[in-house]
Amino acid sequence: MIIPSEVKVAGVIYKVVEKDFVIVDESAGLGSCDFDKTEIELKTGMSQTRKEQVFIHELTHAILFEAGYTEHDEDLVDRFSIVAHQVLKDNRLVSEDKELSHVAGKHLFKSMFTSN
């Protein structure tokens, strides 16, 4: 899975950045989503799989917030994001190749709105 440098959620662009130190509720964490700055932070040095899981977790927070949910059940976000990561990876809905991922995404989007 390619971690993008930015991701659009409900028309809002979130910048995705890696940092040596990520603060979550006044302590060190693996990632965070700042709704005011529209920024997703990921801690540097994680394995690729962990980075992907943390990205999906923080992206889930961004999706919920942009959908109007300001209170997030952290247990629900944890569970959902782990399963979403597994579904995306195991069903090859994401690619390791940036160009293929872009083309696949365009094809998937097109197929959702056209009939065969």
Image: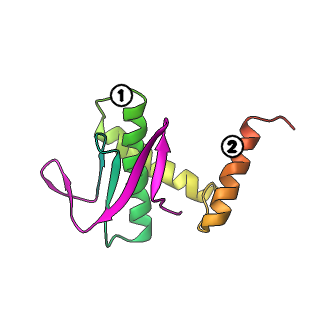
Give the residue drawn at x 74%, y 34%: 113
Q: Is residue 30 above or below residue 114?
A: below
Residue under numbered circle 2: 109
> How many other residues sit within 10 Å of disc 1, few (<14), some (14-19) or many (≥20)?
few
Please provide the residue range marked out in magenta. 1-30
Q: Residue furthest right?
A: 116
Task: Say which of 6 and 86 sits in front.
Answer: 6
Q: Is residue 22 magenta?
A: yes
Q: Secondary structure at mark 1?
A: loop
Give the residue drawn at x 24%, y 69%: 20
> Percent x, y for residue 112?
72, 37
With 84 as the anchor, is 29 left or right in this view? Answer: left
Q: Residue furthest top?
A: 68
Q: Quadrant of residue 68?
A: top left
Looking at the picture, which amino acid does disc 2 mark?
Phe
> Percent x, y for residue 45?
32, 73
> Percent x, y for residue 4?
48, 59
Looking at the picture, which amino acid does disc 1 mark?
Tyr
Magenta stretch, overall SS: strand
Residue under numbered circle 1: 69
Q: Is residue 110 magenta?
A: no
